[in-house]
Image (tube, rainbow, N blue to C red):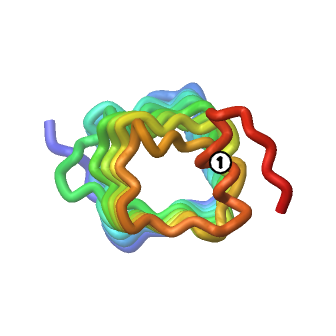
C-alpha cells in the first residue's frame, strides 16, 4: 500500500484527536489550529512544514520524519521526540508551550528555540551544540550528560544545569543566569 502524498496544502482547524491518522508524506504544508492529541503520526513524514497553533498531547511519533519543520504557537504535552526518525531531523520552535516531553539522546545541533515555555523536558545525553534558546523558560528541565558547547542561553531563564555533568565550553549565559549553574551548591547569590 502506497503512502498518500500531500504537497503545498493547507490544513485548517482539522481535528485528528483520538482518530487513526493515515501514514502520509507532507511537503511544504501548513497546519493551522489542528488538533493532533492522542494521534498516532508514526511513519509519516513532514518536510518544510509549519504547524501554527496546533495541539499535540500524547501524540505518538515513532519513526515520524520531521525535516525542516517549524512549530509556532503550539501546545505540546507528553511527547517522545526521541522516537522520531533521526535522518535529517531539523526543528524550529517559536512561542510554544512544551511540557513533560523528552528529547533524550537526540542530535539537535544548532536548533532554534524562541520565546517558549520548555517545562520539565528531558535533554539527557542530547547534543545541543550551538543551539539557541532565545527567551525560553526552562523550568525543571533536565540536562544530564548534555552537550551545550557554544549554545546560547543568555536570554533564557529558570534552568538548572550542573557544569560538572554537562559540556558547556563556550556556552553563553547571562549574569542573572549564573544562578542556574550554581544552584546545586545551595548558595545564595544577590545580584
> Could you tell me which residue is drawn at 15 percent across and 43 percent down?
2
Between 142 and 71, the residue placed more toward the observer is 142
Q: In which quadrant of the rendered image does the N terminus lie?
A: top left
Residue 107 position within the rendered picture, expressed as x and y whole percent measured from the top left: 28, 50
The image quarter containing residue 29 is bottom left
> Could you tell me which residue is drawn at 50 percent across and 69 percent down?
172
- Please give left or right for residue 81 compared with residue 52 in the image: left
Relative to 107, residue 22 above or below: above
Q: Which residue is mark 1?
A: 180
* Label 1: element kind: helix
Residue 164 position within the rendered picture, expressed as x and y whole percent measured from the top left: 42, 39
Q: In which quadrant of the rendered image does the C terminus lie?
A: bottom right
The image quarter containing residue 130 is bottom left
> Could you tell me which residue is drawn at 44 percent across and 39 percent down?
123
> Which class describes the residues within 10 Å of circle 1: few (<14), some (14-19), or many (20+)?
some
Between 3 and 139, the residue placed more toward the observer is 139
- Please give left or right for residue 146 compared with residue 112 in the image: left
Amino acid at each position: 500500500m502506497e503512502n498518500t502524498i500531500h504537497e503545498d496544502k493547507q490544513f485548517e482547524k482539522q481535528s485528528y484527536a483520538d482518530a487513526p491518522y493515515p501514514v502520509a508524506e507532507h511537503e511544504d504544508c501548513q497546519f493551522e489550529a489542528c488538533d493532533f492529541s492522542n494521534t498516532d503520526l508514526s511513519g509519516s513524514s513532514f518536510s518544510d512544514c509549519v504547524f501554527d497553533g496546533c495541539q499535540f498531547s500524547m501524540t505518538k511519533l515513532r519513526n515520524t520524519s520531521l525535516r525542516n519543520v517549524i512549530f509556532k504557537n503550539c501546545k505540546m504535552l507528553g511527547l517522545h521526540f526521541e522516537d522520531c526518525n533521526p535522518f535529517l531531523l531539523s526543528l524550529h520552535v517559536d512561542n510554544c508551550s512544551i511540557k513533560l516531553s523528552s528529547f533524550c539522546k537526540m542530535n539537535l545541533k544548532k536548533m532554534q528555540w524562541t520565546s517558549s515555555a520548555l517545562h520539565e523536558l528531558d535533554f539527557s545525553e542530547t547534543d545541543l551544540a550551538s543551539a539557541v534558546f532565545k527567551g525560553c523558560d526552562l523550568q525543571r528541565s533536565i540536562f544530564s550528560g548534555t552537550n551545550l558547547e557554544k549554545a546560547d542561553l543568555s536570554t533564557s531563564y529558570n534552568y538548572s544545569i550542573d557544569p560538572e555533568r554537562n559540556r558547556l565550553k563556550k556556552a553563553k549565559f547571562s549574569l542573572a543566569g549564573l544562578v542556574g549553574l550554581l544552584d546545586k551548591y545551595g548558595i545564595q547569590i544577590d545580584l
